[in-house]
Amino acid sequence: MQSSKTSLQLSVNGQQYTLDVDPETPLLYVLRNQLQKNGPKYGCGYGQCGACMVLLDNQAVMSCLLPVSAVTDKEIVTIDGLAAIDGSLHPIQQAFIDEQAAQCGYCTNGMIMASVALLTRSKDAGEEEIRQALQTNLCRCGTQSRVLRAVKQAQESMQ
Amino acid sequence: MKNIARREFLLKSGYLSIGFSLLGCTQGSNAATPTPLGEAADFSLDPQMAPLPDGSRIDAWLQVLENGQVRVLTGKMELGQGLKVVMQQVAGEELNIPPQRIDVLIADTGRTQNEGVTAGSRSVERSAMTVRRAAAAAREYMKQLAAKKWETDADALELTPEGVKNNSGTILSFTDLLAGQQLDTEIPQDVSLKPKDQYQWVGSPVPHPDLEKIVRGDAVYIQDMRLPEMVHARLVRPPVYDARLQSRDQAIERMPGVLQIVENGSFLAVIAEEEYQAVKAADALQKSAQWESGTALPEVRSWADYMLEQGEKANHPAPASGNAHHAIYSKPYVMHGSIGPSCAIAVYDEERLHIWSHSQGVYNLRATVSDMTGIPEESIRVTGVRGSGCYGHNGADDVGGDAALIAVAFPGRPVRLQWQRSDEHQWEPYGSAMRMELSASLDNSGRINSWRYDLWSDGHSTRPRGNAGNLIGARLLAEPAVFGGSGRVGGGTRNSEPYYRIPKVDVSDHHVAGPLRTSALRSLGAYANIFAIESFMDELAKKAGKDPLDFRIEHSDDERSVAVLEALRDLIKSEPAAAGEGLGIAFSRYKNSASYCAVAAKVRVDLEQKKIRPLKMWAVLEAGEAINTDGLKNQTEGGMIQSASWTLKEEVKFDTQEILSKNWTEYPIIRYDAIPETEVVIIDRPDLPPLGAGESAQGPAGAAIANAVYAACGKRVRELPIERYLFGS
Ligand code: FES
Ligand code: FES
């Protein structure tokens, strides 16, 4: 029942961090609390909704179940690490704004991270592949048809 | 007196005084740098920032900040429905300032007027219109001030974002003009509004100001707030509503980081330095806790039967035969299911309490927390901060109450309470199950000549309005607050009268005290009533041998109804439907007094594969003056998709011992494999007052899906959710 803290290395958005944490702590809590990242959201803690997504070596993964000790050798990217150094937005971020593809926006982090991972591995993904890539991401406001439009718009602008 | 006793009891039940040192505190190694979230994280415990001006004055709604920026103060909440951008548009328009440059402050008992609850699609109809008038008054007032200074005619002046400008181009900034004063005059009754034909921004698709922050991962939500010395709390709830705590493991206090266990009757929470420490301790506490089982929940096979057996009786004869048509429809309990579970932060200094909350009614929450804790309202401040979309009364108020209980038991440091997924799923108040029974007859020309409608429902609003018993936390205390009940049918009758011309109409409602906790879910009873009425209209049209859309127009007196139906016809007229596919339509005027919405759905049904795929949904919406056309489209598209999910998939499941729908696997909602393409047309009527629109699509979208399923496979589904009815569980 007790577990003690260990010193761990983490690489997030190209920056190295040394942290003193309980190695079992899900990555989500470390990102939100120790590193003060707002992007990844707590939605369910069960790997069912995708609100907590981050990129791990370019793959979109759910950070709510992933012990921080399992990702010390990975390159982690959070949504605030997507924009260029000059602040200009990633085409997917821009497309979400252009299409106003959100209402409350609580799911938006996951939607964007899943889309970025998809277009990195398959930039010409078709309709069904896009839907599949977003299948784990829930949105209760019902903005999914807008999200699909945003992803397609981003594909065009990335050509 | 009772409240005072309860407060003392609360204080005694768990007390760790570490002194109050919020400001100028020293931070431990794990303490986060505060994330201020703009104005919301004004950490002050002062219940009032400054005396609130009377609501008849301009500065109750609109202020000029020191930097010259104009700020709107609204007593309403941003829920993701787009409130802020609408406020920016109406104020900016009157002031001639681009909407993006207007700052908007949302509900805060310390700063904004009491505008009740942000619900029922009324914010635009009422609140935005007040801000429009206040902004117009501000414009006229500032022009007059400048005219006096320049000794000229006010009509020769105009407003720019930088200040008031005269015709030689000189600008006097708002700050110089007001010279430290606020806009502290009355809003004249006859204030002249900008002519609508001069509008630049109202009626356009202005983007929402928060979205860029959201896509950049900035702090936007209450979940993102970090206060100095903040600690983390988690709850451990009973297995069922009224189960009582018998015992628990005392050793959990010694788990790493645990600061305190708050135990009061069956209210159980853990406070820890770090969030994950709180999660682990709550898990251990959950496993060790023993509960005395509460009232068993009933076994229900059919909501239609259950509501009839348990509810008030209808006292008229069985429906006549002959040309009459008769049908019974039902819907189960459905949850709000916010993607972000509810969250609140509270801090107490042994006298004053400050709560940050995503409640839809900050003043009501304040009154209710006061009733629960005995702390006078004047010593409590509730500040509204954005949360995840709520779609009605979800766990927002409850978590605010829970956080208050924990903060009172642990004074001195801000407590962040995050409900876990299962807390939200099991404890939020659901939308009530309903039974709808209809009979009608047709005359020789195939028109409806009589209509009878009976509905059975539990109440649809148990929002806290000052009675502690409406908060779950207060009901679990050793000295429990008493719940006053859900009210007779309350809100269940919304849209129960058909909005059609029928010579003889008879509508009655019957109360059922259902087994599950209920409250306001987007559109209240309107969703189920319109599902039933609009399914029935299709059944009658078939009986009359008429096209369903023509049949509705034939029974419509209101030309605005006809206009949305005709526009919908245009949208779908050349839409093909292959084998296994079907198109269905439905219509309603929300509340029979707000916006008009006609919806079409195209679905593909595969009975063998047990799959229904909504392919496309269309809506035509007329909401009077459209302030933000894209905002209206967004709400309508989202409403259709949410309603498709309710209609096809959703029902709260439970056994006799507990709610089984604890997470998204046990309460599945729509995912991308079933998301329809959406298309919405807005009919703008700038000459008419704006009408609430955020809930208009719920009913017609559900009925359109059911009608499309019938068209696709010949099965008339009257019992929701459709997939369970057609395919089993
Ligand atoms: S919070 Fe991680 S999947 Fe829901
Ligand atoms: S925008 Fe609200 S949950 Fe997706």
Image (cartoon, rainbow, N blue to C red):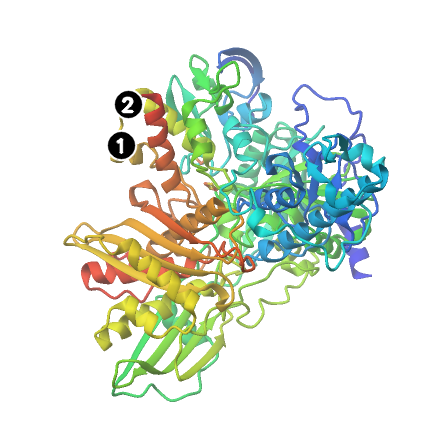
**Mark 1 and 2 residues: CB-CB less than 8 Å, in contact?**
yes
- Say whether residue B475 is visible: yes
In the rendered structure, the residue with mark 1 lies on which chain?
Answer: A
The quadrant of the image that shows the N terminus of chain B is bottom right
Identify the residue at image location x=67%, y=23%: B33
User: Residue B644 location, x and y as percent?
Assistant: 36, 53
Q: Amino acid at mark 1?
A: Glu
| Disc 1/disc 2 C-alpha distance (Å) | 9 Å
User: Residue B183 location, x and y as percent?
Assistant: 80, 44
- Which residue is label 1 attached to? A129
- Say whether residue B248 is visible: no
User: Residue B45 location, x and y as percent?
Assistant: 79, 39
Q: Are marks 1 and 2 on the same chain?
A: yes
Q: Is residue B35 left or right of residue B56?
A: left
- Which residue is label 2 attached to? A122
User: Residue B323 location, x and y as percent?
Assistant: 26, 85
In the rendered structure, the residue with mark 2 lies on which chain?
Answer: A
Indicate whether A9 appears above or below B597.
above
| Nearer the observer, B21 or B128 | B128
Q: Which mark is residue B135?
A: none
